[in-house]
Amino acid sequence: MTEIEVLKADKKNNRLTILIKKASPALVNSIRRAIIESVPTMAIENVELRKNSSVLYDEQIALRLGLLPLTTDLESYNPPSKCKCNGEGCASCQVKLTFEAEGPGVVTASEIKSKDPKIKPVFPETPIVKLLKGQKIEVEATAVLGTGKDHAKWSPAHVWYKHKQIVKIGSVHDPRKVADSCPPGVFEVKNGKLTVNEDKLLVTDLAGLAEEASNGEVKVENTDDFIMFIESFGQLNCKEILEQAAKALDDNLEEFEKLLKEAKE
């Protein structure tokens, strides 16, 4: 039976390392893909530039705004496709954000005013455009829920995984050579003997480096446990991201089961 153990988490839960025990690559990769593709977050979708005398084209401003991570409130908003307004736009599926500025100076995300204080830029110091004296910009934007399957701007996190590895050390004739041939810090030489730094091994994939450098005296074996690393972009914390990914997987399985039953009939 698959088990999950939290190995490391920061105070804000924006970085998380978990151990997934007794799993298959297919399962772990499904979790990874669900996080990247199926977790809904808020992002700017439509931009109206009422004034723009900056050096950047309207399309460049719109692109920069679309890529701004926004804090997300999943309880208050619905995806447009599932909203009672049928995607026409209402307070339940979209939020308006505005800003206007005049140079000289750098316009940052902190100047964006949101109709909903729960929806705002994650990183307020992000620069949007630099204005020279006399240049002006005035923008109204609309943010909606979406998923990374539609566009990367809705993806909530960077996530990757690796096999948990076990290292077996035999009679190594040149331990320094092995240590220097592998990623820094994974192997240490103490009293002329080769030792493994387990913390470094946790985040490193040795591949065949150690075996080759030691002429086969060091064996690296993959287990059926996996280590997954999640780094949130700030729209949701890692706990929320995992919960939403699990929900998305459940929904997909239910839909698949439904299609199977229909196919049999």
Image (spheres, helix red, strand yellow):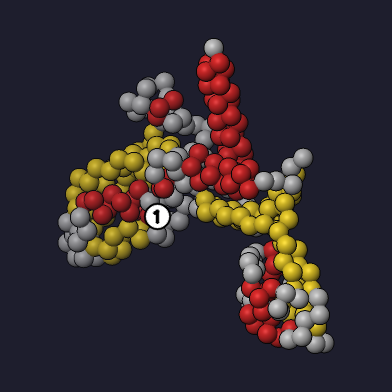
Between 188 and 105, which is closer to the camera in this rendering? 188
Between 134 and 23, which is closer to the camera in this rendering? 23
Give the SS element for disc 1. Answer: helix
Q: Is 174 on the left or on the right of 144, as rendered?
A: right
Q: Is 37 on the left or on the right of 111, as rendered?
A: right
Mark 1 surroundings within 10 Å by alpha-carbon count, few (fewer than 14), some (14 through 19), many (20 or more):
some
Q: Tell me if I can see residue 249 in this picture.
A: yes
Residue under pointer 1: 110
- Quarter-of-image position of residue 181: bottom right
Amino acid type, label 1: Ser
Q: Is residue 143 above or below residue 57?
A: above
- Quarter-of-image position of residue 34: top right
Looking at the figure, which quarter contains the N terminus?
top right
Which residue does the image show at 58% across and 39% down from the upper left?
Answer: 245
Q: Residue furthest front?
A: 215
Between 189 and 84, which is closer to the camera in this rendering? 189
